[in-house]
Image (cartoon, helix red, strand yellow):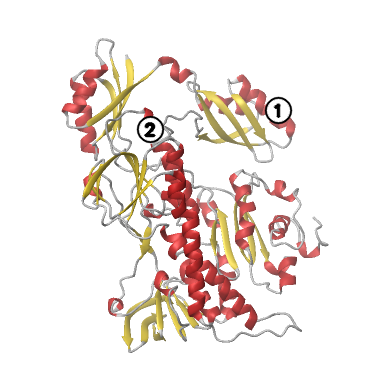
């Protein structure tokens, strides 16, 4: 028997899979496995059946087969699979040698063993079962855990231009022009693809235009204004007058224009892909309509992002409320600002206008801020915002919203008591929705989830094997760096011939409040839910010398570790410049560093990063009893 794989476009559901399988069965194919999500069929044919008959059978069933790829018998036996295996019981380098010898005798290659991290990395031939390696470790008197197969990125790439799939206008059409879109376009161009990008609005997406860049520059202005009014140092006589918001907004807009041109618009000509200004609407699985014309491509990327959405509160539609976009265009600081929603957007923008001079009230349904974070993080930021004079309303049930002249009134019930919160401006910051409504995705065979998000597999492929998706439109982590990572990966998979899984296990996140909040990895609760025996370290910010000299000591460092191996599983920080600190913790979590590894590193004194080292020492010491830099 000969085994083949054929890429198939046109399958959109499990019914299509059955049609393809039935067609292949009729010509004598065996062991048929078809997948509409991957857009492929794998099957076996006897020596007397030509693969062309299978191609014809698929075409006769009204699907579109590509070329057949034959699996050579030696193809699998020459391949190696790479594994990461947790191993308990190792205590020294001698244990590492015992494990390495045991694995070598089991046929493993490329063996790396680390007793500190409690793991072994190795490769096995494709036809050698992982249980053989586990048995070898058990026989050596150690305890193997679960094995994780590691995706190995092939260095061999095949440009799409070398894969003749017929005549198309483009190799790769990208819908959207934000972080995911540009990262993908640049990667695809380097793979010699002919690329077009379609954008209906302003080039650059959310981050540079209405998100990260404009909000963070205004946040910095607000911080300076706040420090001028609340200087903690004696002998310094600082003050701040009323803020003139209009020139500040103009300065913000000038920066946005400069960065949009430098980081987005100018790159279009630099890399030589085409920008089409138009709405995009799918006509079928490989065709979109733009400006009244139809254009085709071998592969597509949907990277249309997400936009603000409003909750279903009676009366809200009749009120002149603000979104995160329109708030940043105000020309006058309101006397009072009410914020419905106190996630990272609500907290950042609420604190921004508090620092510019508004009386700010944050309202949310849940009983505590950032309920998905560890309690210590929620407590620290709640204390900080309250100390600064921001009003926090938690556990609220929204009854209705109304407008009386210029005053917006939010009617809530809290613990059975009615309350009306009034302000000149009302910001809605309760979430975001994917921008998919106008794409006519049904015509392309692309499924969406319950919130309108694009459904993708581990390879960023949609339910149409020709179409990939990346960034906020998938409702994954809403960070521009995640979008850029996914966009590049989508191009390498769609155009570069790779088959690499997306890996979002270790994604740092930062909320740019003051103090800022930064997290990476697992919370204590998440670690317990995953079955870890957990050990934690909690260090109040007043134990960090940098915070003491800054005279800003409200905050916390928290580390989460595996009690058995002492691997760092998560790090969570509330402190000035927490976002600058978290990258070091990201490396620790990603590469499986242990508490011991971090304990043996030096941290520069009087930096906020020293808080990580002190948090590590707190696992088994009282740092208040240590001299500076001791440990």
Q: Can residue 581 be seen in this snapshot?
A: yes
Viewed as shown, does residue 387 lie left or right of 495? right
Mark 2–mark 1 Cα distance, whole angstroms, equals: 45 Å
User: From the viewer's perspective, is residue 170 above or below residue 47?
Assistant: below
Q: Tally the numbered discs.
A: 2
First along the sequence among labels 2 and 1: 1
Q: Quadrant of residue 572?
A: bottom right
Which residue: 32% across, 85% down?
Answer: 403
Q: Is residue 614 above or below residue 533?
A: below
Q: Nearer the viewer, residue 494 or 615?
A: 494
**Can you give x and y, in whole percent of width and height, for residue 631 in the image?**
79, 55
Q: Toward the viewer: 427 or 270?
A: 270
Q: Residue at x 54, y 49 (%)?
A: 506
Left or right: residue 149 versus residue 90 is left
- In percent of width and height, residue 144 lies at 59, 33
Residue 160 is marked as 2
Q: Residue furthest front?
A: 269
Residue pointed to by mark 1? 97
């Amino acid at each position: 028997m000969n085994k083949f794989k054929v890429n198939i476009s046109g399958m959109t559901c499990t019914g299509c899979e059955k049609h393809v399988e039935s067609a292949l069965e009729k010509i004598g194919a065996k062991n048929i496995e078809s997948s509409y999500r991957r857009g492929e069929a794998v099957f076996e044919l006897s020596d007397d059946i030509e693969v062309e008959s299978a191609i014809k059978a698929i075409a006769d069933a009204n699907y579109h087969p590509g070329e057949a790829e034959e699996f050579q018998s030696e193809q699998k036996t020459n391949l190696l699979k790479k594994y990461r295996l947790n191993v308990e019981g190792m205590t020294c380098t001698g244990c590492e040698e015992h494990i390495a010898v045991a694995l070598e005798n089991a046929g493993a290659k490329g063996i790396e063993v680390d007793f500190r991290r409690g793991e072994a990395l190795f490769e096995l031939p494709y036809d050698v079962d992982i249980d053989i390696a586990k048995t070898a470790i058990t026989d050596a008197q150690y305890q193997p855990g679960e094995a994780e197969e590691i995706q190995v990125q092939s260095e061999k790439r095949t440009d799409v231009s070398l894969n003749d799939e017929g005549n198309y206008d483009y190799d790769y059409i990208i819908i959207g022009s934000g972080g995911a879109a540009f990262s993908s376009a640049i990667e695809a161009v380097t793979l010699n693809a002919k690329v077009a990008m379609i954008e209906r609005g302003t080039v650059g997406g959310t981050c540079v235009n209405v998100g990260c860049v404009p909000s963070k520059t205004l946040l910095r202005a607000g911080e300076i204004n706040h420090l001028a009014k609340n200087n903690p140092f004696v002998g310094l006589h600082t003050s701040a007058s009323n803020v003139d918001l209009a020139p500040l907004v103009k300065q913000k807009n000038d920066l946005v224009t400069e960065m949009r041109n430098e980081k987005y618009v100018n790159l279009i000509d630099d890399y030589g892909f085409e920008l089409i200004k138009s709405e995009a609407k799918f006509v079928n699985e490989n065709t979109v309509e733009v400006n009244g014309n139809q254009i085709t491509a071998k592969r597509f990327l949907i990277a249309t992002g997400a936009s603000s959405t409003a909750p279903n509160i009676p009366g809200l539609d009749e009120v002149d409320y603000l979104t995160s976009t329109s708030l940043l265009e105000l020309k006058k600081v309101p006397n009072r600002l009410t914020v419905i929603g106190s996630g990272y957007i609500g907290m950042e923008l609420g604190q921004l206008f508090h620092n510019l001079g508004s009386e700010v009230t944050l309202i949310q349904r849940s009983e505590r801020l950032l309920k998905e974070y560890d309690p210590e993080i929620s407590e620290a930021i709640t204390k900080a915002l309250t100390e600064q004079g921001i009003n926090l309303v938690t556990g609220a049930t929204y009854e209705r919203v109304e407008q009386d002249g210029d005053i917006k009134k939010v009617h809530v019930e809290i613990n059975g008591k009615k309350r009306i919160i009034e302000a000149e401006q009302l910001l809605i910051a309760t979430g975001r929705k994917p921008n998919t409504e106008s794409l006519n995705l049904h015509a392309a065979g692309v499924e969406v989830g319950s919130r309108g998000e694009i459904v993708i597999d581990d390879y960023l492929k949609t339910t149409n094997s020709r179409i990939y998706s990346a960034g906020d439109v998938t409702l994954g982590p809403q960070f521009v760096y995640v979008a850029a990572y996914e966009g590049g990966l989508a191009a390498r998979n769609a155009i570069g011939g790779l088959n690499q899984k997306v890996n979002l296990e270790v994604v740092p996140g930062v909320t740019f409040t003051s103090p800022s909040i930064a997290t990476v990895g697992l919370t204590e609760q998440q670690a317990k839910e995953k079955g870890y025996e957990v050990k934690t370290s909690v260090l109040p910010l007043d134990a960090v010398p940098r915070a003491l000299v800054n005279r800003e000591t409200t905050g916390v460092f928290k580390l989460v570790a595996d009690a058995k191996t002492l691997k760092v599983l998560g790090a969570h920080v509330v402190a000035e410049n927490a976002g600058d600190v978290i990258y070091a913790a990201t490396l620790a979590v990603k590469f499986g560093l242990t508490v011991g590894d971090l304990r043996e590193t030096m941290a520069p004194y009087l930096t906020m990063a020293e808080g990580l080292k002190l948090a590590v020492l707190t696992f088994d010491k009282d740092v208040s009893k240590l001299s500076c830099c001791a440990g």
